[in-house]
Image (cartoon, rainbow, N blue to C red):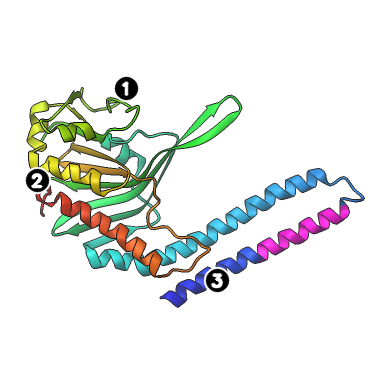
Amino acid sequence: MAEQLEQIRKEGMKKMLIAGAFIVLIFTLILIFSASYDVGPVFVIGLCVSVIVLSCIYGSVKKKYVAAYKELYLRDMLEQEFEEVTVDFENGFSEEQIAKGHLLTLHERFYSNDYVSAKLYGIPFECSDVHIQDVVRSGKHTSVVTRFQGLYMMVPLKKKFTSWLVVREKEFLDNGNPRGWLSDMPELEKIEVEDERFNELYSIYASDGTEAFYLLTPAFIEKLIDFEKRFEGRCYFGFWNQKMHIAIDDRKEHFELSLMSSVDEHVLYHHRTEVLMIKEIIELIQKECEVI
């Protein structure tokens, strides 16, 4: 497998080098003629076109390389840890699915890939990488701001409940009540539990305070406190439609590769760790989950 993957990478790098050499040749000729002719505009246009061409080639080559790696290695890693594994490395959750989760606010740009559906200890789950960006315009300046980047999971729970509950790790300038103007969520109230450690870590919003305390038992509260300790980034939890939604904003694009380096033990170890992160999340909340 390693030889097959390295061959794909080398062929891709060869295409990049050939394209780069051709572009250098074109620019050399432009510079030679620039002594006799005004080729300034041509140089600028050529530079822009070259950047676009190289970016397209790199994107195409990397996409092929990463896709091959995921099929050859990542699928096997997942199947070693989970049962009934279904993957779609090209796609992930839809914007509609994330919007209905009400944990994350959607902005102008939405990306999702590396969808996984599987079971662990009989517990079904779905997960995917999600990346949400906002385009901020100020006068003539435009910038792209990442609002969320990380893992999103959905896991069914044993307990039956009809209300809505959102638990979000606190941050500086917390953005307040998760219910938006056009949301189908009912009115939510901010509540607190008896555990002051939990109140310091998380903001809790519920449509039914009584049912919220039914879900947030002392044992489950300890589990969610463990989440904050174990996983990097900001943690979000949502409870509705008999499912627990989990979003971990660690600003990482999981299971990705660089075309510049070969797949080695360091890369494989890193991705095994990310697979085990999914496993650890399920094990952490195992007693709360539905076993089919």
- The correct choice, above or below, for 161 with respect to 18 in the image is above
What number is the disc on residue 10?
3
Which mark lies nearer to you, 2 or 3? Answer: 3
Q: Amino acid under label 3?
A: Lys
The residue carrying mark 1 is: 181
Q: Is residue 202 visible?
A: no
Residue 137 coordinates in the image, percent (x, y): 53, 28
Q: Is residue 156 magenta?
A: no
Which residue is depicted at the point 86% across and 56% down? 32
Relative vertical location of residue 24 with respect to residue 199 in this rendering, above or below: below
Q: Residues within 10 Å of mark 3 (few under 14, many from 20)?
A: some
Q: Is residue 121 above or below residue 253?
A: below
Q: Is residue 59 visible?
A: yes
At numbered mark 3, what does the secondary structure look like: helix, strand or loop?
A: helix
Amino acid type at circle 2 is Lys
Q: Which residues are magenta?
A: 18-33
Which circle, 1 or 3, is nearer the viewer?
A: 3
Give the CA separation, mark 2 to mark 1: 31 Å
The image quarter in which residue 111 lies: top left
